[in-house]
Amino acid sequence: MIILPTAVVYNGKVYVFHQGRGDSGWLWYNVFNGSEWAGDTKVGKTGITSSPSVVVYNDQIYVFHQGRGDSGWLWYNVFDGSQWAYTEVRGTGLTDDPDAVVM
């Protein structure tokens, strides 16, 4: 399966989420401030097996993804500007890339 990157603007910066190099199965992100890229940062203990989906809601970044190893379960991570939290959406299975939208 091809895992595509996804991007969102948060606090005036572009955040790009992607799988690590070499099909590592881990979620990484890079931040562009309009002039330069900060460099890749791993989202701790967050594995993915499908393309992530990202939105900004209530001044936080939400990244939705299928867990590592084709687990078939929906997970999401929340970034508040300084730290990450992650949660499994219990009872919510999926077989493909999740989509997220804020209305």
Image (tube, helix red, strand yellow):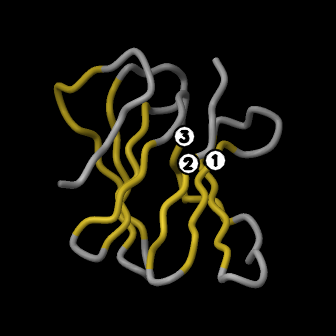
Q: Which amino acid type corresponds to the residue marked 3 in the rendered image? A: Gly
Q: Which residue is mark 1?
A: 18
Q: Which residue is mark 2?
A: 6
Could you say which quadrant of the image residue 57 lies in?
bottom left
Question: The residue tagged with tag 2: helix, strand or loop?
Answer: strand
Q: Which residue is mark 3?
A: 47
- Percent from the top left, x then y, of residue 70? 50, 19
- Quadrant containing the N terminus in the rendered view: top right
Badge 1 crowding class, 10 Å Cα cut-off, few under 14, some 14 to 19, many 20 or more, is many
In the rendered structure, the answer to whether residue 29 lies left or right of residue 46 reads right
Seen as rendered, the residue at the extreme right is 22
Q: Which of these two is toward me, 81 or 44?
A: 81
Indicate which disc, 1 or 2, sits on the residue closer to the N terminus: 2
Viewer-nearest of discs 1 and 2: 2
Badge 2 crowding class, 10 Å Cα cut-off, few under 14, some 14 to 19, many 20 or more, is some
The residues tagged by marks 1 and 3 sit, at their Cα atoms, a distance apart of 11 Å
Viewer-nearest of discs 2 and 3: 2
Q: Which residue is depicted at the point 56% across and 78% down?
A: 13
Q: Which amino acid type corresponds to the residue marked 2 in the rendered image? A: Thr
